[in-house]
Amino acid sequence: MIQAIITKPFADQDPGTSGLRKKVKIFETPHYTENFIQSIFDCTGKSKGKRLIVGGDGRFFNQQVIQKVLKIAAANGFASIMVGKGGILSTPAVSHLIQKYKAHGGIILSASHNPGGSDGDFGIKYNIASGGPAPEKVTKGIYACSQKIRCYRIANVGDIDLDRLGHQEIGGMKIEIVDPVRDYADLMEKLFDFQAIRQAIADGLRFRFDAMHAVSGPYAHEIFEKRLGFPTGTVIKGQPLPDFGNKNPDPNPVHAKDLIDLLMSDGGPDFGAASDGDGDRNLVIGKGIFITPSDSLAILAANAHLVKGYRAGVAGVARSMPTSTAIDRVAKKHRFFLYETPTGWKFFCNLLDMGLITLCGEESFGTGSSHVLEKDGLWAILMWLNILSITGKSALDIVRNHWREYGRNYYSRHDYEEVDTAAAKEMMKNLHDRLESLPGMEIGGFKIEKADEFVYHDPVDCSVSHNQGLRILFKNGSRIVFRLSGTGTQGATVRVYMERYEADPVLQEQNTQKALSTLISIADEIGNLKLYLNRNAPTVIT
Ligand code: G16
């Protein structure tokens, strides 16, 4: 029943910021997907007798790959596999199930916010026994295995019925098809004061959640409508679809524009939110105000003590390097330890696992806490709903009061997507080579104090991660950061992050792009963006 299939390595199976992401067509290449799954098992070893968790965001090819995972896992000696019904499991739900059921690890099938459908993207992520994404030493190991693979093992059996709850079997391996939502929703009920939110709903709190036809729909229907009692229709686009309704499941101002417009309209609800393909990102919008992910992290940290699951206090906080320094001001005032990590949730995991931090987040719409070792979209939204309910204040007032107290960090990210890879690398190299000459230089009234390449020294495992972005730090506290994205599937994506601090309340209500206009021109000039990238403007501004 178990077959050994002869194969050859594929040179491009190096996982990026968050797993292996490629076009569906590439994953459909004969042996491509099987090779990578076998490489995960070869690298992570000792599968005999262990349990694995498997699920995905419902995108095109999800169920076919789950069948492959089940058959390859059976041939590699796993004792049992837990799978979400219909192949559905959000990224934070997988992380929680790994911890709760003490699994060896988990495989998450998702390309996150990238487009779906047969012409879209697919992805495979591996999470380790702690529940967190595989750290760099594991992803490097998986890549090394994929480069010397000669054969993979697979059980030659028919497909498993992924829609039938309960137990099935392949050879000696048990397969348990579980409700993807229940355990996760129970966890949320432990962390948050659902009664306070129910009371706020009774008092008139109106909310809209856009699930973007991605994985969080079933979770949102259960938590927001069934358990909390928001009216039916509060959750829109709640049915996961293989092509996400032909839209990008990316909760940003471009792809969630309808929701933002609704919240900016006179008759709109009090609070709006959206999540991405695999349910780990969040967008939060108050009536009349778009809340940046960096501000959201700072505000959640400043108010965490109000929320049931966090009353014991916050041990520390962390942000990725390009994320705005708004959280740093909160950490300073509340005396939280503060850590600055490279982009990639995996870098938070040692800190979370060791109890060094309680909350963390990124500018890329990711926020989370020590409740699971993944960023968690619905968790962040429930944190906000809980804080709104307990304080009785509007989101707009909460954000404005925060700026008055801590100052405002104007912040924006400009993305140049699908640019020529060689040109993008050349642009970064050229800037890298000039870094030493920049300090002391004055451009547009801004004086450069420091310019460097960000290198991270992990305080827990002492690993060192080089090449994590180029930083230009100005004397007045402003920053420009240049990075190449690690999640694109076509050409290269250059990300330019800009930040300026404003302490004066009178000057805190400007349009963000206007407030940053000088820094935007400086970034253009220092990076020679137009020259190298052959673009007049960024593709996406967030
Ligand atoms: C992943 C990572 C995040 C990262 C984001 C963008 O998120 O987990 O930590 O911030 O990609 O990365 P990059 O700037 O390299 O494209 P997700 O939600 O896509 O898995």
Image (spheres, rainbow, N blue to C red):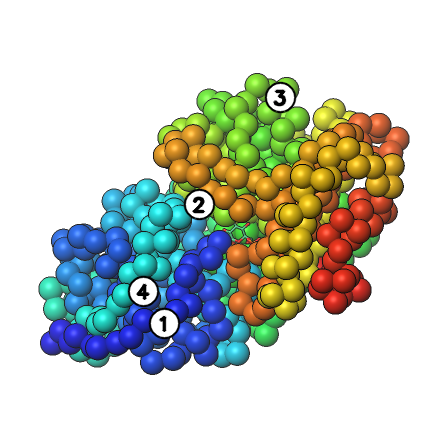
Closer to the camera in the image, 6 or 381:
6
- Name which residue type carries label 1: Phe
Looking at the image, residue 370 sits to the left or right of residue 69; the answer is: right
Instruction: Give the residue number, with chain letter if any, for mark 2.
Output: 346
Q: What is the CA distance from the residue labelled 4 to the residue labelled 3?
A: 45 Å
Percent x, y for residue 352? Answer: 42, 34
Is label 2 in a helix, a strand or a loop?
Answer: helix
Q: Earlier in the sequence, mark 4 or mark 3?
A: 4
> Quarter of the image holding residue 460?
top left
- Name which residue type carries label 3: Lys
Q: What is the CA distance from the residue labelled 1 to the residue labelled 2?
A: 25 Å
Say above or below: 22 vs 434.
Answer: below
Say which mark, if any, is on residue 10: 1
Please say if the residues under marks 2 and 3 sit with CB atoms less than 8 Å apart.
Answer: no
- Name which residue type carries label 4: Ser
Is label 1 in a helix, a strand or a loop?
Answer: loop
Looking at the image, residue 357 sits to the left or right of residue 441; the answer is: left
Instruction: Give the residue number, with chain letter if any, for mark 4.
Output: 146
Q: Is mark 2 within 8 Å of ligand 1?
A: yes
Say which mark, if any, is on residue 332: 3
At x 62%, y 53%, the residue is 429
Is label 4 in a helix, a strand or a loop?
Answer: helix
Q: Residues within 10 Å of mark 1 (few under 14, many from 20)?
A: some
